[in-house]
Amino acid sequence: MSTEKVTEEEISDLVDRFYAKVQVDPEIGPIFNALVKDWPEHLAKLKNFWSTVMLTTGRYKGDPMMTHLQIPLPLEPSHFTVWLGLFAETAHEVMTPEHAASIIARSERIAVNFKAGLAYTRPSFAEAELLNR
């Protein structure tokens, strides 16, 4: 197995292509489009986030959990399923299989944490999560 890391170029390409899909997705697109007022700024922030997650660059300085907990729109477990599916699809399109597997695994762990936070703070999310099992 190679020890080569995901590259900044792969991260940038992934974020750009993935969020282009998100913006037009019928289920999660309306949520993102209602919340994101400046897409270029948002994409730059997410490139910094994934660079920090995958390459430990430290460029991202935010609190992604708090950001997601403060979303005023209803979030459902199915939204995470759609997000993860689009993310995995796009990762496989733009990365080597090993790099795609690595970033997909990280995204899945992050999603588990976000869903746990939402379930703790929003009883309706917890109920929907239980119904989806």
Image (tube, rainbow, N blue to C red):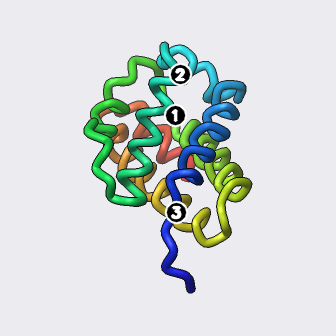
Locate residue 112 relative to residue 101 in the image: left or right: left
- The circle drawn on residue 6 is 3
Q: Which residue is mark 1?
A: 76
Q: Position of residue 89 (x, y in %)?
A: 70, 52
- The nearer-to-camera label among 2 and 1 is 2
The mark nearer the N terminus, 3 or 2, is 3
Q: CA distance from mark 3 to mark 2?
A: 24 Å
Locate residue 54 relative to residue 120 in the image: left or right: right
The mark nearer the N terminus, 2 or 1, is 2
Which residue sits furthest bottom? 1
When the figure is inspected, residue 104 is found, relative to residue 126, above or below; the finding is: below
Q: CA distance from mark 2 to mark 1?
A: 23 Å
Q: Which residue is mark 2?
A: 39
Which residue type carries mark 1?
Glu
Locate residue 104 relative to residue 123 in the image: left or right: right
Which residue type carries mark 2?
Trp
Which of the pair 130/117 is nearer the observer?
Answer: 117
When the figure is inspected, residue 36 is found, relative to residue 110, above or below; the finding is: above
Which residue type carries mark 3?
Val
Residue at (42%, 51%) from the top-left corner? 51
